[in-house]
Image (tube, rainbow, N blue to C red):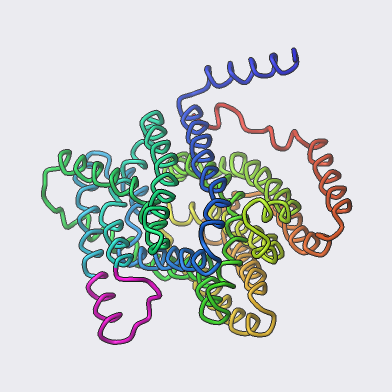
Amino acid sequence: MNFLKVNFRKVREYIVNAPLALKASIAYMVVNFMQKGVSFLTAPIFTRVLSTADYGKVSVYTSWVEIMGMFAMFGVYDNVYNNGYLEYKNDRENMTWSMLLFSNFMTCVTFLVVWFVNHHVFHFLQVSDILLCFMFLCFLFEPAFEFWKTQQRFHYRYKAACVYAIFVMIGSPIFALSGIFLFPGYKVEARIIGAQLVTVILGICCYLLEWFRSNKRIDFQYWKYTFTFNLPLFPYMISAFILNCCDRIMISYMEGDSAAGIYSIAYTAAAIVGIVWTSINSAMTPIVYKRCYDDHMDSLSDILLPLQTFYGIVCVTVMALAPEVIRFLAPSSYGDGMYAVPAIIGGTFFNTGYSIFSIPIIAKKKQKYVTYVGVFTSILNIILNLLLIPRFGYLAAGYTTLASYFIQYIGTYIFLPRILGESIYRKDRIAVNSTLVVASAIVFPMIYRWVWIRYLLLAVLLYMIWRNRNVLLRLRSRDFS
């Protein structure tokens, strides 16, 4: 007990005396982890109140949201806003308002095109008109909420952002479950609309806040800046969607909604590791952009690679525990999904690792190189899915995605020094992390039936990691200043 008290006191003193940037990073990590954790913990409820077909429809809707969102919002609250926020320090309010109106313009144009094509040319969406309208309503206000969160992160104002995140964390599952029980004939619609209701309300509030802050006019130089910055990245955005979502849509068309639902529960299990990286990334993105903007990229390896190593450990641990995670998340009808979990987690690891390489490239406005790699791997992924899903079933989609993400990851790392003119990441650490994840994704599905072997391997791995724990403890307070 004294040991725990002493260590708790040390951690508390470390946080209290830490720089503001580190405090903000810790707060964002904790709250983001809690928010995503609630989504994970409520998944067993939704898998039991929704059929596998309904769960598949929700997953397909989510995939369509991602691809429609690329066109409807044009990626305004991602890299372009991070760059613009640093580049236009003296006119941030008007830049934000102009980018917001540009996003709204793209949303209206995209909605008209999609509605016309889907109703008068050919019916390509597996989404009801109610959900389609709600989808684009979200697109109108989502950028305002994301802009506000980015502003809070760049200024390390973590308290208000954490409070809003908690509102979303609590409100989304409550409204979604209430909707399902109140409207049993529209379970899919109730699940989706209820989960997004709090975010839409907060988006409207942030939209009004940006309107009050601005000069209420459109500055078309920011429209031009947004368009010219994101246009070279647009093929990459599409390729990122293809790598992340097209497998579920292709499974739905080729194998049916039930297969898509079972495969999607594997994605939900893999989302455990996504929670960890999203929490890290939301806190680290402003720091990484500032280092790139100030030409201090040589310090990125010491910050990001220990975090990636920690993330790789989390990935391998969840791979080993996939059968238990699936049993927790869903009834036995979803059981086969456990065999897709390691491959999906491996793909998630390499996708997030790829973001470590791509952010410095984008920050230096050399987006076309990111696009080249992304487009190639997305085309490869589609070809592999078309060849292997009909032959081996929906589980093959996990390994086609893993292979595609791995090629994207390694390809970008190889060309990174040529693009930036310098080598900023250590090759040995990259090789160790990659080998560990790939080997685990291949081995663990083969031994899921032998529980004691699986647990023994995991125990040995964790012991070796503990023996080399100093590698993970290299981050210092000054790295966040």
Q: Is residue 127 left or right of residue 300?
A: left
Q: Residue at x 51, y 67 (%)?
A: 56
The one nearer the camera, 243 or 444, is 444
Q: Kindly tell me whether residue 368 is visible in this rendering.
A: no
Q: Position of residue 261 (x, y in %)?
A: 56, 67
In the image, residue 101 lies in the stretch drawn in magenta: no
Q: Is residue 475 left or right of residue 212?
A: right
Q: Position of residue 336 (x, y in %)?
A: 70, 66
Question: Farthest residue in the bottom direction?
Answer: 121
Q: Residue at x 43, y 40 (%)?
A: 290
Magenta stretch: helix, strand or loop mostly: helix
Q: Quadrant of the N terminus?
A: top right
Compared with residue 167, is residue 417 higher up or lower down, i.e. above or below? below
Q: Give the residues in magenta.
A: 110-129
Q: Is residue 247 left or right of residue 143?
A: right
Q: Position of residue 402 (x, y in %)?
A: 65, 66
The one nearer the camera, 90 or 75, is 75
Q: Kindly tell me whether residue 395 is visible in this rendering.
A: yes
